Amino acid sequence: AQRKSSFPSDFLWGGATAANQLEGAYLEGGKGLTTVDLLPTGPERMKIAMGALSSFEPSPEHFYPSHEAIDFYHRYKEDIALFAEMGFKCFRMSIAWSRIFPNGDEATPNEAGLQFYDDVFDELLKYNIEPVVTICHFDIPVHLVKTYGGWKNRVMVELYEKYATTLFKRYKNKVKYWMTFNEINMLLHLPFIGAGMVFEAGEDKNKILYQAAHHELVASALAVKACHEIIPEAKIGCMLAAGAVYPYTSNPDDVWRAMELDRENFFFIDVQSKGYYPGYTKRFFRDHGIEIKMEAQDEQLLRENTVDYIGFSYYSSRCISTDPEILSQMTEGNAFPSVENPYLKASEWGWPIDPKGLRITCNQLYDRYNKPLFIVENGLGAVDTLEGEEIHDQYRIDYLRGHFAEMAEALEDGVEILGYTSWGPIDLVSAGTGEMKKRYGYIYVDRNNDGTGSLRRIKKDSFHFYKKVIESNGSEF
Ligand code: P53
C-alpha cells in the first residue's frame, strides 16, 4: 500500500549480520579459534551456551556450523553486490576479535585480519553503503577463556580496550557507526555466548555474572571514550536484546514482575546511557549479597562516557505471570523467560509475533533514554522451500510489513530512529540453534543443517519487496 513516508530522508535501511554467523574461514588469514567455534549444532549447543563447556578443542563427533558458515569470507563481493542491488544504505556487521588478535593478548595485531575488514569496508563504500560495526558480537578468542576465564576476569577490560582502539585507529576514515557489545544483556542469559564464561559446580553464579557485567560496562565506556577521541564525528552505541515484558494479568504482582524482568535487561543500558548504577540494581545486589569489585576511577569513567544512541534487537515481546500454574507452561526456544501470550501467534520456533510490541518497545526506550534509537535486528526465522529457483516467502513479507507499519507509527509518535537493519539479510547460521534452516534472509543460501549444499545465492520474493521499501523510503510496503 502507498502511504506518506514517516521516514526521514537519511534513514539508514539495511541488514545486520555477525562475523561468526556468516564468514566461515574459521582458521584462515591467521584467525584464532573463538568461543562460538566451539558451539555445535544439536542439543549440546544450549548447554555450552549457558556455561557447561567441557573442552577447548572442537570434537570430531560434532558439527560446528561457524567453521564454514556461508563463506562470506570468500564471497563478500558477490554478497555486497546483492545488498547494493536492494539499495542498502547501511550494513551492520561485526569484526571477529580473533582475526585481529588471534589469541586476544598479543602485543601487535594480525595484519591479514585488519586487511580483510579494510577490503570489506571498501567494497561497501564503493556502493555508498555505510558500515555499522559491532566490536564484539559474541565471539571472543578461546585463549582468553582458557587463560583468564573470559569476562569473569578484569584483565579483559584492557584487552578489549586495546582491541577497540586498534579498530578505531585503523578504520577511522571508513566507519562512522559503532556498537560496543552485541546484546550486552545476553551475558545473564547465555553466559558462554555472551561473555565466554564457563561455570564450575558450587560457584556463586549471580556474583560472577554481575562482576563480569561490570567489566563489560567499564570496557564499553572505555571504548566510547577512545572512539570519541580518535573519531570525533563517529557515533557509538550500546546494544540491547530488547522486547517489552508484558504482565499476563492486571494483578499488581504480575505487573511488578514484568517490571523487574524489564529492568534486569535495562540495567545494562541504564549504565551505558545514563552513566550510573540504578537504585533498583543496588537493591538487587544488597538482597543477594553481591558486592561488585570496582576500581577507583570506574564510576567517573561510566558517568563521563555514555553512548550516543541506543541500538537494539527486537524479535518479540515477552510475557510473565506470577501464577505457578501459568508459569509451569513457560515457552521454550528463547533465552528469555516468557509465558504464552494468548493474543499472539508464534513463529515455527515458538517466538511470538508482535508488531505492535516494536512500537511499544521504541516508545519505552525513547522515553527512558531520550537518545536516538537504532533498530539493528528484527526479522522472522522460518523454513523456506525452494520451488525451482524461487522462494515464495510471503510469511516473511507479512512479518516485515507489520513491523514497518509500527516503526512508522513510532516515528509519528516522535521517537527518533536512525535506521533499521533486519537480521540476516542473507541466510546465515542461527545463533540459538546453530541451524541453517532457520532462515531470515532476502537472499537464500543453498546450505543445509549438516553443511551440505552448493552455497549458491538465490533471491527470494522478499528481496524484491525490501528493495521497493527502501526505494520508496518506507512509503510503500
Ligand atoms: P537466532 C536468542 C538466542 C541467541 C541470540 O537468533 C539471540 C537471541 C534473540 O534475542 O540474539 C540475536 O539466530 C543475536 C543474533 C541472532 C539473532 O538474535 O537464534 O544478536 O546473533 O542470530 C536471532 O534465530
Image: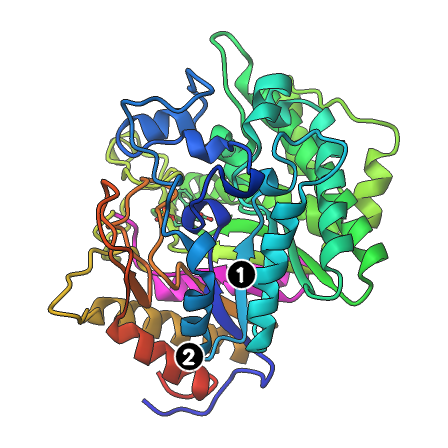
Residue at (77%, 47%) from the top-left corner? 165
Say if 167 sits above or below 278 in the image.
Answer: below
Which quadrant would residue 302 be assigned to in this image? top right
Say if 4 sits above or below 59 in the image.
Answer: below
| SS label for mark 2 | helix
Q: Can residue 413 be seen in this view?
A: no
Name the image quarter holding the N terminus: bottom left
* Spatial CA span between label 2 and label 1: 16 Å
Which quadrant would residue 449 be assigned to in this image? top left
Q: In this view, does 25 lie to the left or right of 432?
A: right
Query: Callout 2: few (<14), some (14-19), or many (20+) C-alpha neighbours within 10 Å?
Result: few
| SS label for mark 1 | strand
Give amino acid for label 1: Arg
Q: Does the magenta stretch include residue 196?
A: no
Per the image, the residue denoted by label 1 is 92
Could you tell which of marks 2 and 1 lies nearer the N-terminus?
A: 2
Say if 183 sits above or below 298 in the image.
Answer: below
- 262 or 155, which lies in front? 155
Measured as percent of width and height from the top left, residue 304 is found at 84, 49
Q: In this view, does 317 lie to the left or right of 368?
A: left
Residue at (31%, 59%) from the top-left corner? 380
Measured as percent of width and height from the top left, residue 307 is found at 72, 55
Numbered badge on residue 85: 2
Q: Is residue 462 left or right of residue 231?
A: left
Numbered badge on residue 127: none
Q: Give the range drawn in magenta.
A: 350-379
Residue at (75%, 37%) from the top-left corner? 108
Give amino acid for label 2: Glu
Q: Does the magenta stretch include residue 376?
A: yes
Which quadrant would residue 271 be assigned to in this image? top right
